[in-house]
Amino acid sequence: MARRSERFLADRRPLSTVRRQPDHRPEGGSPVFTIHFATANHRPDFIVTLRNDIDGWGEDLPGIYENDEWRFELPEQRYPAGLAFKFVLERTYWMLGPNLFLQPVAGGDYRLAEHLKARL
């Protein structure tokens, strides 16, 4: 069986916009966009965080796990020029492959799903 670090996001679908929610705002906040990472392999009691080039590669942004996916809601105004990012498992194991890049749009909903076939 592969170690956790060898399996983490070894194969994945490309990031894509699947729907747009106009001016989505949490209570009293500024507009946000949402990044979803669908996985049944890396759910609580594991922790998946998001790290990016804007907040710093050492800064973990927490997500919420529900309905078999991690959800990360980020303020649009913080990332006007987009962001390069990676998911990190247990604050230690970085996803495999190159950084992902996203140029968010107002109310954007972006999904990344894990394939189960690679390196199992």
Image (cartoon, helix red, strand yellow):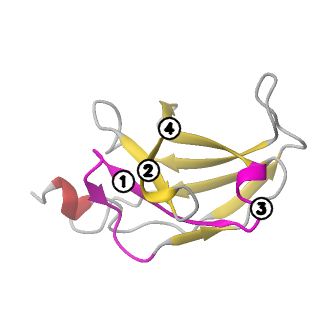
Between the C-alphas of marks 3 and 1, the distance is: 23 Å
| Residue 2 circle label | none
Label 1 vs 4, first from the N-terminus: 4
Question: Element at badge 4?
Answer: loop
Q: Which residue is drawn at 76% across and 28% down?
A: 26
Q: Can residue 39 be seen in this view?
A: no
Question: Element at badge 2?
Answer: strand
For disc 3, the marked residue is 80
Between the C-alphas of marks 4 and 3, the distance is: 21 Å
| Residue 63 circle label | 4
Q: Do the residues labelled 4 and 3 touch (CB within 8 Å)?
A: no
Question: Element at badge 1?
Answer: strand
Instruction: Report the side of 81 relative to 70 (left or right).
Output: right
Marks 3, 1: nearer the viewer:
3
Q: What residue type is labelled 3?
A: Pro
Q: Which residue is drawn at 81% across and 47% down?
A: 107
Q: Do the residues labelled 1 and 4 touch (CB within 8 Å)?
A: no
- Check the image and report above or below for 32 versus 81: above
Q: What quarter of the picture does the C terminus occupy?
A: bottom left
For disc 2, the marked residue is 59
Instruction: Report the side of 30 relative to 13 (left or right).
Output: right
Q: Which portion, as a residue range, is magenta?
A: 76-98
Instruction: Report the side of 104 relative to 54 (left or right).
Output: right
Disc 4 residue crowd, few under 14, some 14–19, many 20+, Cα 10 Å: some
For disc 1, the marked residue is 88
Q: What residue type is labelled 2?
A: Glu
Label 2 vs 1, first from the N-terminus: 2
Q: Residue at x 60, y 70 (%)?
A: 101
